[in-house]
């Protein structure tokens, strides 16, 4: 296993850290003591053959599954065992291979939902318009900015079920952007997307990391496109991290070749 990354600037806690994380399904060990540190404001990629434990790892980290051992820390804060909603409130977002949007709502309305509550949603304050019009206006500006940054300004009024698959994945990024997520876990963000739009999605990811300081951990099998955008790559096999480093270092590692080729 290569040298583990440190937090940006060499100071402070990493954006996200997994320490000795274990997960069992019955008698099957799916995660076998996973150690991983993510640097703030960087794009990390998690690769490995099917069944190596990648999706299980992000399910455990995000709170969708409970770990059977080890620790998960978000910005130095212990989040092990917290439910997914609580982890999300602390700044960790999770997207799925099949985008999870409200089909009957427009792109703008989906982003407004992700922006969170405003005071007008309280039944006591709703009649007192002066108390919440400012919140509503700010949310609309944030939504417009997020949609524009993700290249969806022209589709803001389009129902999400009428967007293309690639556009729905850009919508997931817009929702994460407006929600203020510090760490974003993504499961195959360019699966089924044409190459031009796939690059657009990764360009948006890079922009969010560079400009906003968001930290990404991405599972993606289309390595010909995705590796060029990754600052650091982790390779998994049989529930363990077997290599980490730059894309070139990891792809040249004998253990990674063995994992993919089954040698």
Image (cartoon, helix red, strand yellow):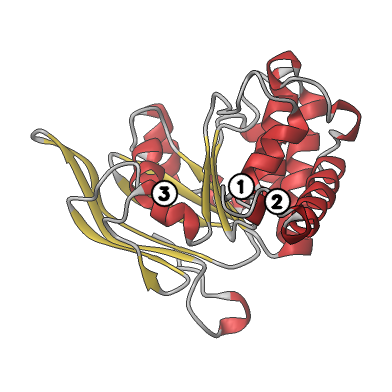
Q: Residue at x 8, y 35 (%)?
A: 27
In the image, residue 72 above or below residue 108: below
In the image, residue 146 above or below residue 159: below
Q: Residue at x 26, y 56 (%)?
A: 81
Q: Assign a secondary structure to mark 3.
A: helix
Q: Nearer the viewer, residue 162 or 39?
A: 162
Disc 1 or 3, which lies upstream in sequence? 3
For residue 230, say whether it is visible: no
Q: Residue at x 72, y 24 (%)?
A: 166
In the image, residue 205 above or below residue 198: below
Task: Tell me the tag on residue 238.
Answer: none
Farthest residue, direction left: 27
What residue did someone put label 3 on?
A: 85
Residue 72, image x, y percentages: 34, 62
Q: Give the spatial CA distance, label 2 vs label 1.
A: 18 Å
Q: Residue at x 34, y 63 (%)?
A: 79
Relative side of 93 to 2, left or right: right
Residue 158, image x, y percentages: 80, 21
Residue 55, image x, y percentages: 40, 36
Disc 2 or 1, which lies upstream in sequence? 1
Q: Are marks 2 and 3 in contact (CB under 8 Å)?
A: no
Q: Nearer the viewer, residue 155 or 130?
A: 130
Task: Tell me the tag on residue 178.
Answer: 2
Front tag of 2 and 1: 1
Task: Tell me the tag on residue 121.
Answer: 1
């Amino acid at each position: 296993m290569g040298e583990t990354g440190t937090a940006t600037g060499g100071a402070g806690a990493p954006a996200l850290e997994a320490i000795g994380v274990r997960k069992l399904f019955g008698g099957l060990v799916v995660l076998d003591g996973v150690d991983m540190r993510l640097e703030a404001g960087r794009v990390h990629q998690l690769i490995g053959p099917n069944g190596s434990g990648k999706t299980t790892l992000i399910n455990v980290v995000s709170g969708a599954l409970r770990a059977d051992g080890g620790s998960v820390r978000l910005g130095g804060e212990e989040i092990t065992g917290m439910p997914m909603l609580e982890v999300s409130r602390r700044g960790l977002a999770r997207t799925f291979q099949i985008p999870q949007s409200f089909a009957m709502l427009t792109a703008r309305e989906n982003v407004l939902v992700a922006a969170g509550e405003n005071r007008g949603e309280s039944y006591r304050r709703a009649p007192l318009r002066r108390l919440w019009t400012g919140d509503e206006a700010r949310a609309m500006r944030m939504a417009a900015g997020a949609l524009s940054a993700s290249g969806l300004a022209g589709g803001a009024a389009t129902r999400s079920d009428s967007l293309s698959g690639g556009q729905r994945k850009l919508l997931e990024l817009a929702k994460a952007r407006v929600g203020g997520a510090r760490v974003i876990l993504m499961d195959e963000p360019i699966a089924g997307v044409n190459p031009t739009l796939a690059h657009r999605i990764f360009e948006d990811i890079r922009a969010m990391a560079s400009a906003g300081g968001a930290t990404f951990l991405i599972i993606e099998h289309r390595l010909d496109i995705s590796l060029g955008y990754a600052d650091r790559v982790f390779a998994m096999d049989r529930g363990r991290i077997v290599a980490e480093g730059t894309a070139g270092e990891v792809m040249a590692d004998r253990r990674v070749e063995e994992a993919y080729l089954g040698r």
